[in-house]
Image: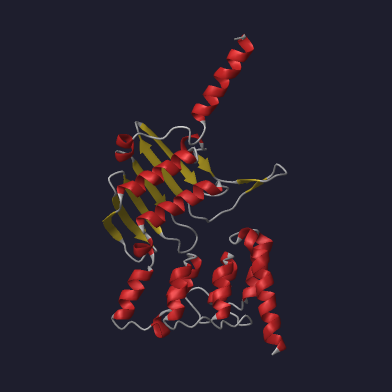
Amino acid sequence: MSKAAAFTCLLMTSLLSQSPGAQEPAPSTLKAAVIKMSRTACFGTCPVYDLELDGSGSVTYVGKKFVRVVGKRTAHIDPAKVAELIRQFHAINFFGLQDSYMTMRNPNGTETVVTDLPSTFLSLTIGGKQKQIEDYYGTPEELIDLEDQIDKLANTQQWLFIDTATIRKWAGSGWNAQENGDKYLDKAIYWRDRDLATLLLDLGTDPSAQGTRTIPLVAAAQTGDREILSLLLKRGADPNRRDRHGRSALGAAVSEESAHFVGGPTIPEVIRILKAAEDRTHQK
């Protein structure tokens, strides 16, 4: 074998050994792993809490501010699901990512800087290695998805806000969604929890009621959630109604498109849906 061929072979071996998914942690290493995630305050009412999961399936939650449950709660989940979650860290090359993401680098070389957002601190300790990443802005989508997976696996929503199981339990005990469901529908939309939004509407929550922050259609327009938006319209939400701040859903969507913020690439489709809905009401 020539020196050039040998060098190429060595280089390829090295690259393959470093690529995400090339190796997986041993079962014993997975069992001893610890995942920690903390979400911090923003200029608003963002939930502030700490979360810890370990390879044995133990979950520890500590709610601090703007959460339904303040203080410590514990739970237990299937260790196999924690192991699969840790494999997702490996798949996105977590240890090879930046230590922090604070700004957005634009294609033209400029940077976008924003203020008043919450930060998420995510760490993994496994096999004698430990890494923490601060996620503020400009974070890779796969890391954001991983953070969401952690919340879903731990079911932090039951402590932060509410979940479908709790609402069903309340409804079975006489809780009235027609009188009390509006504030939960508002938050379900911001959480993009379509199952919870559907359940609240099924139980009689008004799809046009003024919630804690705004009306449901404006909330859905701001988040860019086309499915919840269409669900609300199907259930009779008025596309022309304005919230207490004078905002319509269409106006909110246009503002989001101009800011290139929360709703992202789905906003143009949201605008199209709302324009069509307004046109239908004007034709009646």
Total numbered circles: 0
Residue 203 falls in image quadrant? bottom left
Q: Horizontally, is 78 left or right of 241 in the view?
A: left
Q: In the rendering, at what x and y percent does residue 157 appear?
A: 38, 62
- Image-based side of 160 in relation to 7, left or right: left
Please report the residue visible at 43 percent of the width from the left and 77 percent of the height from the top: 200
Q: Residue furthest top?
A: 2
| Quadrant assignment for the C terminus | bottom right
Q: Nearer the viewer, residue 219 or 11?
A: 11
Rendering quarter of residue 266: bottom right
Question: Visible in this render: residue 54?
Answer: yes
Horizontal relation, residue 240 to residue 31: left or right: right
Q: Position of residue 252 (x, y in %)?
A: 63, 71
Q: Quadrant of the N terminus?
A: top right
- What residue is rendered at 48% in x and 68% in y? 194
Looking at the image, can residue 244 be seen? no
Q: Is residue 54 above or below residue 188?
A: above
- Name the residue: 43% across, 74% down: 184
Question: Is the residue 181 above or below the residue 222 in the image?
Answer: below
Q: What colouring does the structure picture have?
A: secondary structure
Q: Nearer the viewer, residue 249 or 22?
A: 22
- Compared with residue 79, is residue 255 higher up or lower down, i.e. above or below? below
Q: Position of residue 108 (x, y in %)?
A: 73, 44
x 53%, y 28%: residue: 16
Check the image and report above or below for 66 versus 93: below
